[in-house]
């Protein structure tokens, strides 16, 4: 159950694709038009090519080519008096939509304040109701694996507890769990405010109307037990994201950070972020699953943190539309991010980035031989530069190993033209010690030693 802001003007998607060189420096933006004027509530990135988006009144779009084109796949939902509020997808074929008060789709669906989950298994060609409940509101659904998923909904009238549902058969059927958390202070859930990590960790945010503190509910045992932690906001927790089981962010018109899995939350600010100027605006929050990368936007400015929200920098500040919701997917070393916006376009930003830095061609002179230089500085903490040169076109791999010979990072793995190169290695996620880095190019192989001291 959620309030709607009065400043929504239209509909759009912003698409960010990240994969192998400097992100902020090499980011490019293009504008695409989405054939829709309905507000797009949420976008879900499946992989580098596939994403789904859901609108306020049954509008559902899908792309299978990285956003070059978007196709309407929700016509069978109809345009009745209800709303669709959130979406999750696991492939180009299967997706799930939450909503309320629709009875224009296939099958017998009760009306009169009925909430539902619809599922498609054919790319949106047909949809079927897989869950329906009277006098409630399903806020979000999240597939934990291709077979298992969880949904969170507002308390059903008179029950005094949240609706928590599970599936173990790829969403074909859903049932309520026996250990649903109790409602406190009349709070309700929030559209899309649901996050999971692994099979056991679940978080969802709430909304209150009486100026008491909203909360983040947390389970570390797949919903068997629940705890509640107040968030430092006046009204609601619009989004909650965790990069692992401990480090997470939540937001309303500002940000809060947790480093203990959501047991406690502390407010944080961003450089140049003027809270007073945006008092009635909403912050957008997104995360790359299983990593330290977090993204936050306010108005047309995109902020990025690469250390679980401890520090932030402006990643981009030239979008024409305010951003509403974000979603990321990672395939190998590449990541794609999508944001819904408030304008009538699709804004696409694309870049390539390696996890441990930028591989830069330092000179156009053709070296006479292959060579791997000593890293500098050495010892280092936590970053160092590694230089190497290539004398002919070749497949090049530069990797880092621990003292036992286990590969801990791949810095370069692609065909290289002749030249001298510099790549940065970041060891912030590794323990202090001796590491080896190895360059292999054709028949040339060389290994050197470096020392990380923290």
Image (tube, rainbow, N blue to C red):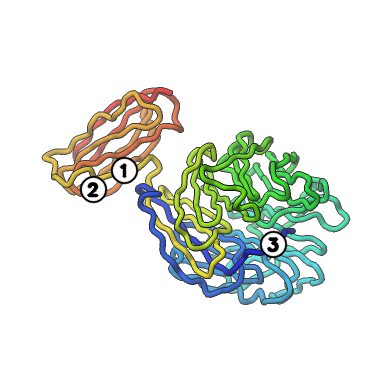
Residue 135 location (% of width, % of height): 82, 63
Cα–Cα gap, marks 1 and 3: 47 Å
Residue 344 location (% of width, % of height): 53, 70
Q: Residue at x 34, y 32 (%)?
A: 384
Residue 324 location (% of width, % of height): 58, 59
At mark 1, the secondary structure is strand
The residue furthest front is 277
280 vs 204, nearest the viewer: 280
Q: Residue at x 50, y 48 (%)?
A: 303
Q: Is residue 54 left or right of residue 100?
A: left
At mark 2, the secondary structure is strand
84 vs 321, nearest the viewer: 321
Would you say the residues marked 1 and 2 are in contact, meaning their CB atoms lie under 8 Å apart? Answer: yes
Cα–Cα gap, marks 1 and 2: 9 Å
Circle 2 Cα neighbour tier, 10 Å, few/some/many (<14 / 14–19 / ≥20): some
Q: Nearer the viewer, mark 3 or mark 2?
A: 3
Q: Quadrant of residue 441?
A: top left
420 vs 143, nearest the viewer: 420
Q: Is residue 101 left or right of residue 416?
A: right
N-terminal-most mark, 3 or 2:
3
Circle 3 Cα neighbour tier, 10 Å, few/some/many (<14 / 14–19 / ≥20): few
Circle count: 3
Instruction: Work out whether residue 198 can be spotted.
Output: no
| 358 up-or-down from 149: above or below | above
Residue 243 location (% of width, % of height): 55, 42
Q: Which residue position holds label 3?
A: 4
In the picture, the quarter occupied by the C terminus is top left
Point out which mark residue 416 bears.
2
Q: Is residue 230 left or right of residue 309?
A: right
Q: Quadrant of residue 363?
A: top left
Circle 1 Cα neighbour tier, 10 Å, few/some/many (<14 / 14–19 / ≥20): many
């Amino acid at each position: 159950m959620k309030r709607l802001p009065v400043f929504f003007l239209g509909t759009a998607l912003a698409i960010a694709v990240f994969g192998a060189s400097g992100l902020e420096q090499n980011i490019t933006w293009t504008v695409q038009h989405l054939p829709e004027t309905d507000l797009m509530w949420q976008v879900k990135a499946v992989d580098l090519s596939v994403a789904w988006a859901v609108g306020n009144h049954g509008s559902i779009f899908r792309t299978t080519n990285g956003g070059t084109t978007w196709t309407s796949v929700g016509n069978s939902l109809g345009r009745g008096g209800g709303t669709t509020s959130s979406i999750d997808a696991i492939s180009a074929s299967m997706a799930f939509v939450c909503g309320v008060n629709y009875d224009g789709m296939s099958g017998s669906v009760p009306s009169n304040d009925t909430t539902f989950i619809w599922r498609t298994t054919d790319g949106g060609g047909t949809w079927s109701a897989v869950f329906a409940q009277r006098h409630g509101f399903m806020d979000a659904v999240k597939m934990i694996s291709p077979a298992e998923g969880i949904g969170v909904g507002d308390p059903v009238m008179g029950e005094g507890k949240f609706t928590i549902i599970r599936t173990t058969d790829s969403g074909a059927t859903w049932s309520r769990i026996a250990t649903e958390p109790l409602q406190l202070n009349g709070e309700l859930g929030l559209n899309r405010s649901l996050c999971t990590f692994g099979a056991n960790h679940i978080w969802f945010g709430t909304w209150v109307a009486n100026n008491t503190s909203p909360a983040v509910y947390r389970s570390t045992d797949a919903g068997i037990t629940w705890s509640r932690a107040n968030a430092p906001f006046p009204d609601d927790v619009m989004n909650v994201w965790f990069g692992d089981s401990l480090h997470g962010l939540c937001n309303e018109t500002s940000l809060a950070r947790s480093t203990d899995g959501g047991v406690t939350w502390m407010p944080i600010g961003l450089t140049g972020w003027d809270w007073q100027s945006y008092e009635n605006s909403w912050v957008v929050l997104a995360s790359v699953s299983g990593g330290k990368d977090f993204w936050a936007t306010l108005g047309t400015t995109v902020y990025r943190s690469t250390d679980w929200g401890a520090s932030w920098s402006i990643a981009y500040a030239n979008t024409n539309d305010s951003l509403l919701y974000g979603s990321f997917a990672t395939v190998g070393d590449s990541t794609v991010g999508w944001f819904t916006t408030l304008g009538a376009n699709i804004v696409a930003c694309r870049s390539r980035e390696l996890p441990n830095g930028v591989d830069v061609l330092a000179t156009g002179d053709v070296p006479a031989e292959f060579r791997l230089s000593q890293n500098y500085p050495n010892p280092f903490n936590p970053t160092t530069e590694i230089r190497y040169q290539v004398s002919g076109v070749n497949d090049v791999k530069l990797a880092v190993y621990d003292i036992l010979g286990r590969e801990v990072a791949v810095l370069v793995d692609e065909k290289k033209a002749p030249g001298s190169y510099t790549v940065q290695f970041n060891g912030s996620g590794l323990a202090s010690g001796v590491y080896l880095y190895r360059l292999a190019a054709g028949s040339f192989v060389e290994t050197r030693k470096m020392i990380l001291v923290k």
